[in-house]
Image (cartoon, grey):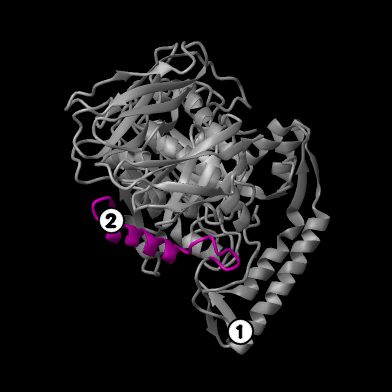
Amino acid sequence: MKRFTLFAAGVLTMLAITGVSLTFAGNDLSDLIEQEKATMGSVYKVCNQDLVLARKAVITFKANLLETNEDKTCHYMQLDSEDIMKLEPFGFSIEPATSWIDQKLEALDNLKQKVELQALTKSLTKETTAIPGYDCYETVEETFVAAQGIATSHPDLATWIDIGNSWEKENGLGGYDMKVLKLTNSSIPGTKPILFINSAMHAREYATAPLVLNFATYLVENYGIDADATWILDYHEIHMLLHTNPDGRKMAETGLYWRKNTNTDYCGPTSNNRGADLNRNFTFGWNTADGSSGYECDEDYRGPIPGSEPEIQAVQSYVRSIFDDNRGPAATDAAPDDTSGIHLDIHSYSELVLWPWGSTSDIAPNGSQMQTLGRKFAYWNGYTPEQSIGLYPTDGTSDGVSYGELGVPAFTFELGTSFFQKCTTYTNTIVPDNMPALIYAAKVVRTPYITPAGPNAEDIVFSSSTAAPGSLVTITATISDSRFNNSNGTEITQNIIQAEYYIDTPPWETSPTPVAISMAASDGSFDEKTEEVTAVIDTAGWALGKYMIFVQGKDGGNVMGAVSAGFLTISEAGTTPVITSCDPATGGRKDRLNISVYGSNFDGGASVDFGSKIRILDTTIVSDTRIDLRIKILRLAALGARDVIVTNLDGEYGVLTDGFRVTE
């Protein structure tokens, strides 16, 4: 069956105008629109009130998927008779999507008129910034420029690496380099664990590459400012293949509903269904589970042979070069518990966190450990965690090379609720929900089969983040063993039994030897799954400078969890800050607020503290009398009045008593 691939959702741009016809990549766009209109009759509304089955239908029929309704019980899909027969045994109602089709046909007619008018007037803009209609999403070129800019601006932290060619470049038709942005502090030598992230494998999934680029920007821009971003880049490596399918992405940037690469050897050089599905072309498990198509025009066409596409050849070669082979050849061979590395494949949409196997309902040899980590990821982004088997299997997917071959835990994030996600949703939901999950992945990549079972260290707060030599500084933190998403099964948790901090040397280092210093439960005993812990740091004898304080906890299963860190600066005394007001002075739990603190004697290094469970996201020293902040009030923040403390680099601090209040 020739499946639907091309709903034009936005304004077509980046096109060459020839006479009165408009062409793109050798195709007459009016003809492409007519091709699409001809396929509309096979779009169906597919519904099931059982959310589990509705969700699994998305996993299995992702290539057929076009849209989903708000409550996630109904999907609009391109189906043939064989697809319908596969869905019917599960109780799905299936009916022609008449109203939906009428809306799309009208949109396509309007688009065709616009295309023809633009061709006649030759007024179409040939260059664009951002994807038209979606100013939050960079084009392929803009992504590459941004990544190169990161490498140029931060040569000690970033490298922009060419790992191969796209299909079009490989065949002399323009195209793109396949490029990886590698982040790590190159001045700290040694072998480091690696987090590999690829995105935009399916071209129409707009939010994927921008999210990963956002993560890269966050890490480098906060190096030396945020302690966690700093130690992640000091001791780990983050490798980001931002565009796994750049040729296809250029097609999708015009508004076309493009999924595959643009290989003209399949389905005809001018067909809007040409190309191979890159996420069915991986060598491991290729064409082994009836989980892909052998028909060239299908959206899940697997290619003629395993790894036929240059994009997949580049990905597989690179993954094999950065990860050791830790898994035996048998399907039942597990990777060792101390395996390092994580692979994240970022897709959209469906709000899912998935792990192997997708080719069988059998649990993978390391399946229980990947489930634990998957439920941790899903706690942060709020998605549903589950094994990637749907109603039927898939094969030849990206986790084959990383987990199937090498034993490295592999996950797919399905972002958001739409392929062409609105910018408001991307900015306000997808980014803030998924950034903590990406940061957590970067934290636990050293031992991903072990550490996620342990408790998280969070919300590190110092009584004064800047202190004079010899000062006593109180440190508090939260240690929690409950950070799992239990929406799809319940993870076993234990009480906290231990917490400790380390000064400058993290617990995994061997030289110099790390020194663990005990922290106490604030309420006097370790007897709960979430504990606030505290200690007093004696800075007697400390030299002036900035110190990194690592915090880690252990649960009743004797598992040490993920590390978090904070900066403590030792500085000579100076002019004491004075605080006169804090505006706004009230915020509810889970709020994000912009706040201004007013007073005097705020120098360029001043810091602000609102107490436990209020996280400062950004700080701007506006002047000697004003500091602007963006804060997040955490869910466990205690209600009531808080003191506001401003500390300068000299260790002097001013206090505004009851200057801020936390409400429900």
Total numbered labels: 2
- Residue 301: tell me if it is visible: no
Query: In which quarter of the view is residue 543 placed?
Result: top left
Query: How far across and how far down the image is residue 431, in percent?
Result: 53, 48
Amino acid at pointer 1: Ala
Amino acid at pointer 2: His
> Does residue 150 show up magenta in the picture?
yes
Q: Which residue is at the front of the view, 384 or 509? A: 509
> Does residue 144 show up magenta in the picture?
yes
Helix, strand or loop status at disc 1: helix
Query: In which quarter of the view is residue 573 placed?
Result: top left
- Residue 503: tell me if it is visible: yes
Q: Which residue is mark 1?
A: 119
- 426 vs 138, left or right, is right
Query: How far across and how far down the image is residue 454, in percent?
Result: 43, 20
Q: Which residue is mark 2?
A: 154
Mark 1, residues whose alpha carbon is within 10 Å: few (<14), some, or many (≥20)?
many
Check whether the beta carbons of the residues at disc 1 and disc 2 lie within 8 A of each other. no
Query: How far across and how far down the image is residue 420, in percent?
Result: 61, 57
Q: Which residue is at the front of the view, 296 or 139? A: 139
Q: Gap in Å between the C-alphas at discs 1 and 2?
A: 44 Å
Lower position in the chain sequence, tag 1 or tag 2: 1
The residue sitting at 76% across, 49% down in the picture is 44
Mark 2, residues whose alpha carbon is within 10 Å: few (<14), some, or many (≥20)?
some
Q: Is residue 122 above or below residue 585?
A: below
Query: How far across and how far down the image is residue 344, in percent?
Result: 44, 40
The residue sitting at 57% across, 59% down in the picture is 258
- Give the magenta range: 131-159
Q: Which residue is at the front of the view, 263 or 366? A: 366
Helix, strand or loop status at disc 2: loop
Disc number lying in front (1 or 2): 2
